[in-house]
Image: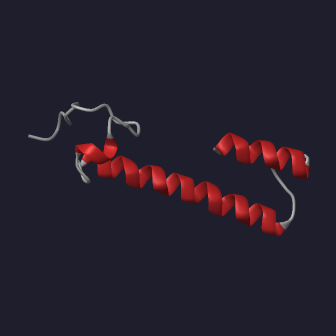
Amino acid sequence: MCIVVLLVRRWKVGGELGGSRNGRVGSLVFLCMLWFIYIIMSVLQAYDVGGKDIWAGLTFGIQPGVKCPYKQ
C-alpha cells in the first residue's frame, strides 16, 4: 500500500517529496495511519486477542508459537 502512495505521488507531483501542503499532510496522515494499524494488529496477535477464528492463519510480523525468551 505504501508503494502505491509513492507511485501516485511520483506521477502527480513528480517525486516522492514535495508538492502542495495538502498532499504532504495527506500522505503523512495516511502512512502514519497504516503504521499505527500495523502496530495495533501486531499487539493484538501477540496477546491472542480476538480468538483463532478471526485471524485464520494471518500473521503480522510475529511467528505463531514463538515465546518470548525473557518471559517465564
Q: Position of residue 28 (x, y in %)?
A: 67, 60
Q: In this rendering, does residue 16 appear at all?
A: no
Taking depth in this image into account, of 2 and 16 the one nearest to the observer is 2
In the rendering, at what x and y percent does residue 3 appear? 69, 40
Q: Name the side, left or right, on which 36 lies relative to 14.
A: left
The location of residue 35, given as percent across then percent down, is 52, 52
In the rendered image, the vertical position of residue 44 relative to residue 25, given as above or below: above
Name which residue lies at 37% across and 47% down: 42
Q: Residue at x 24, y 43 (%)?
A: 52
Quarter of the image with the N terminus is top right
Q: Is residue 3 left or right of residue 37?
A: right
Which residue sits furthest front? 53
At horizontal 79% and vertical 42% (from top left) the residue drawn is 7
Q: Nearer the viewer, residue 57 or 8?
A: 57
**Where 71 sits versus 12, above or below?**
above
| Quadrant of the drawing holding the C terminus | top left
Residue 36 position, x and y percent, is: 48, 57
Residue 46: image quadrant is top left
Q: Is residue 33 something one can see in this rendering?
A: yes
Q: Hey, which residue is sitting farthest left in the picture? A: 72
Vertical comparison of 27 with 8: above or below? below
Q: What is the number of callouts on the image?
A: 0
Considering every residue shown, the one lying at the far right of the view is 14
